[in-house]
Image: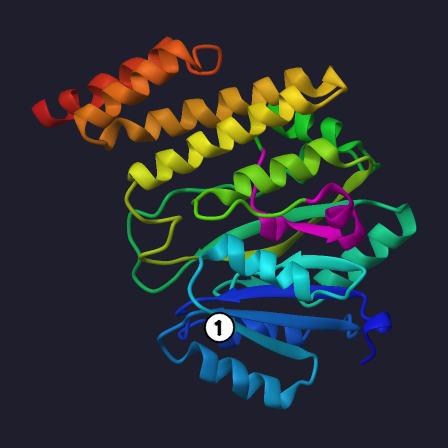
Amino acid sequence: MENKNIKVSVVIPVYNTEKYVREAVESIMRQSLKELEIIIINDGSTDGSLHIAEELKSADNRIKIYSQANQGLSMARNAGILHAHGTYIYFMDSDDLLEKDAMQLCYRKCEEEKLDFVFFDAQSFFDGNLKNAPSLSYNRTDKLEDRTYTGDEALKTQLENREYTPSACLNFIRRSFLEKNGLRFYPGIVHEDQLFTTLLYLQAGKTACIKRTFFQRRMRENSIMTGKFTNRNIEGYLTVTREILDFKKRTVERKNGAIIDLYLSQMLDAAMWQAHTLRLPERLRLAWLCLHKYRKYVSARTIGTLLFKSLLTNRQ
């Protein structure tokens, strides 16, 4: 297929997911929209993931494989953007699944309504005998109207309903919009979707939702979603905070300042609540940051939980 005829570029970073990658890629190969390219970024896999990807490529010439040394999810996605030729771009994880008509309906919606991006819902499913997985909701479109929004409006509505889900895999994006705004994934952190998706909304002139559950998120052991909360998690959230505040300072139009404040309040409050499991010196550092730099965004109750919940739990 000539590059000019590609409607959608699906970017799939792959790192040691040999157990799942075939099923994930095949869910894209089966899409009813055929004019797409499947860009697999092999991010230094040491298992059989690359071999499986090459098998799939031999059966479908829309698949392109690019290998690099392990650099993390953000850099793999950014590499995918560089190789993309489609009018639109979609970021897929290598252990998840997508409904057959998702790309077709997203493409049609964006073309008909001239959207910068369209978003949709998801549901999670559990892999094997996974226990104690977090209960996550990816349904947020039921309280949205079937109309176009500015990105600010759509973000504000979801935040007010406490239904904002920043997963990059729930957005179908016009590639020229990414290029115009220089939007990329922040390297070297976890929770990179918090930053990418929030900046996507804050800069979008026109968006809408499709009230369908297209995306199937796999909850499995040893993933970011189910792993223990560590210093790496909190550093990711703090990086997101700094970058969002920097964007707020640089933004000429201050109309979205209140929306940014609402987002940071919800995100930081939740992050600090989870951080009560960290070691005491780290909790003290975070409490100082909350009191001196981010007091506007973190409640006194949450600071109390950060400092004392683990002590109370250990005494029970």
Query: Left or right: 231 with respect to 147?
Result: left
Identify the image quadrant of the C terminus.
Answer: top left
Picture coordinates of residue 19, whole percent (x, y): 40, 74
Query: Left or right: 30 with respect to 88?
Result: left
* Amino acid type at image mark 1: Val
Look at the image and give the residue range highlighted in magenta.
164-182
Quick check: can you spot residue 174?
Answer: yes
Please tell me in which quadrant of the rendered image residue 305 appears. top left
Which residue appears at 63% of the width and 70% of the height?
A: 39
70 up-or-down from 289: above or below: below
Quickly name the residue at label 1: 21
Query: Left or right: 149 with respect to 112?
Result: left
- Magenta span includes 179: yes
Picture coordinates of residue 176, whole percent (x, y): 80, 51
Which residue appears at 78% of the width and 70% of the height?
A: 33
Query: Left or right: 255 with respect to 275?
Result: right
Picture coordinates of residue 43, whole percent (x, y): 46, 67
